[in-house]
Image (cartoon, rainbow, N blue to C red):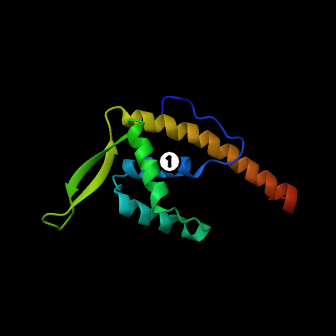
Amino acid sequence: MGEKRSSSGFLVKQRAFLKLYMITMTEQERLYGLKLLDVLRDEFRSYGFRPNHSEVYKALHDLIEDGVLKQVKRKKEGMKFQEVVYYTFTDGGYEKAQRYKQQLKVELERCEAMLKKAIRDNFGPV
């Protein structure tokens, strides 16, 4: 995560998009694997986006490898023995996450402008 994100020239990649939401959900302390997948699917159902299980976990693993997140096992609420793997920030991970979010914000704003241009150029004023 130390390197600067470079634009592909087109739209933001799915994994970068998912990582953004995982960081935000970690900030809100709502992050464990299956719940995350359910929340993302609910949030984006109306847009026709349904992230798949493997992409969500690949993005989580990227954040772990980049030293942003770590796994912490906790007992599942109301369960005596069942554990759930939660994700929290590493030492220094929060700062890395904030830098990533800021870089991605710039990229998303660029993508938004491209999409608006495409709509305007092909369908008239927005």
Q: Where, quadrant-wise, is the C terminus in this rendering?
A: bottom right
Q: Secondary structure under badge 1?
A: helix
Q: Quadrant of residue 85?
A: bottom left
Q: Position of residue 120 (x, y in %)?
A: 83, 56
* Horizontal side of residue 96 vs 87, given as left or right: right
Which residue is at the far left?
80
Which residue is at the far bottom?
46
As drawn, 85 above or below 94: below
Residue at figure coordinates x 66%, y 38% from the top left: 7
Residue at figure coordinates x 74%, y 53% from the top left: 115
Q: Position of residue 125 (x, y in %)?
A: 84, 58
* Horizontal side of residue 124 vs 46, given as left or right: right
Residue 124 visible at all: no
Amino acid type of disc 1?
Leu
* Horizontal side of residue 95 vs 15, given as left or right: left
Residue at figure coordinates x 72%, y 41% from the top left: 9
Residue 9 visible at all: yes
Q: Position of residue 16 (x, y in %)?
A: 54, 46
Residue carrying label 1: 20
Q: Quadrant of residue 64?
A: top left
Residue at figure coordinates x 36%, y 58% from the top left: 33
Q: Residues within 10 Å of mark 1 (few under 14, many from 20)?
A: many
Tag count in the figure? Answer: 1
> Camera-side residue: 22 or 126?
22
Q: Position of residue 12 (x, y in %)?
A: 63, 47
